[in-house]
Structure formats: C-alpha cells, structure tokens
Amino acid sequence: MVRKAKLRFEFYDEDGNKIVLSIQGRITPDLILRYASLFSSPPSTEDFETHSSIFKNMLRILSELSSSSEWFTSEDVQSLYEARYGVSIKLSTVSTYLQRLTEQGVLYRRKTGRFYNYKILNRSLLV
C-alpha cells in the first residue's frame, strides 16, 4: 500500500486570523517552498539563496549516500557537508532538513538510544 504524504501549514496573519493550508499526495521540496512562500513575508534574496543552496547541497549529499544501503546519522551528513562544501553547518539545521525529508517519505528514521538513524527510502525524490 502506497502511503500518501500529508503536510499542513498553519499561520496567523497580522489581524490574528488563522490560515490553514493542507497538501496531500506527492510532496516535493519545490512544492513546499512554493506554498510556504505564499504565507510568509517575502524573504530577502540572500535568505532565499542561502536556504535554497543548503537544501540543494543537502540533497546532493543524500544522493551520494543513496549509493549504499547503509544507515547514517545527522552527524554523518554534517561531516560530509562540511568536507564537501567547506562551510560549517549546525547539527540542528541538518536534523531539521532530515526530519522534513522523513516527513516527505524520502527517508526512513529509527531511534537507537538517544540518536536517530536514517535510511533512504525514495531515491527518485533526491534528484
């Protein structure tokens, strides 16, 4: 059975009105960014480029990891990211991206002790 992904955004406007957007089906990173941008203040070009490049770089790192069927941790991704791109990235940032990709059905996550391990489920979404 194919599990449909679900994503729900909740926002409040400046008047206190609650705005809810729910998406079900094939959810891609571009789709999320497109709809999320409708409800946020326009980001600066620099903020968007930074977020976009981090996300693209994260997908490239995961594509490299997808060649193996091994489990990996957020620390593994952080180390690969820093080695490949020569910039430091917070572990919390890596964990946030991995969690989002888990929610989208790209990754599988299991808890081992205090830590999470990840495995790639859907390689086609990494392209």
Image (spheres, helix red, strand yellow):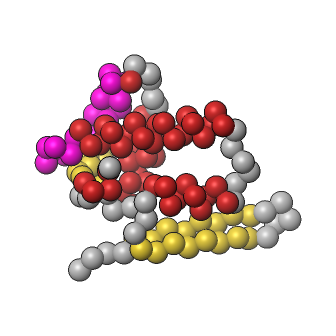
Residue 98, percent across and down?
Answer: 38, 48
Q: Residue at x 45, y 29 (%)?
A: 89
Helix, strand or loop: magenta stretch: helix
Residue 71, percent across and down?
Answer: 19, 46
Q: Which residue occupies the extreme top position in the image?
A: 86
* Residue 95, quarter of the rendered image: top left
Residue 112 visible? The answer is no
Residue 17, percent across and down?
Answer: 79, 70
Q: Residue at x 33, y 24 (%)?
A: 84
* Residue 124, quarter of the rendered image: bottom left
User: Which region of the structure is painted magenta?
Assistant: 65-84
Q: Residue at x 64, y 66 (%)?
A: 10
Q: Would residue 55 appear left or right of 35 to someone viewing this image?
A: left
Q: Which residue occupies the extreme bottom position in the image?
A: 1
Residue 89 visible? The answer is yes
Membership of 96 in magenta stretch:
no
Q: Which residue occupies the extreme left position in the image?
A: 69
Q: Is residue 121 above or below residue 42?
A: below
Q: Is residue 87 above or below residue 59?
A: above
Q: Which residue occupies the extreme right position in the image?
A: 15
Q: Is residue 102 above or below residue 4?
A: above
Q: Would residue 122 appear left or right of 93 to someone viewing this image?
A: left
Residue 4, percent across and down?
Answer: 36, 75
Q: Quadrant of the N terminus?
A: bottom left
Q: Residue at x 36, y 43 (%)?
A: 59
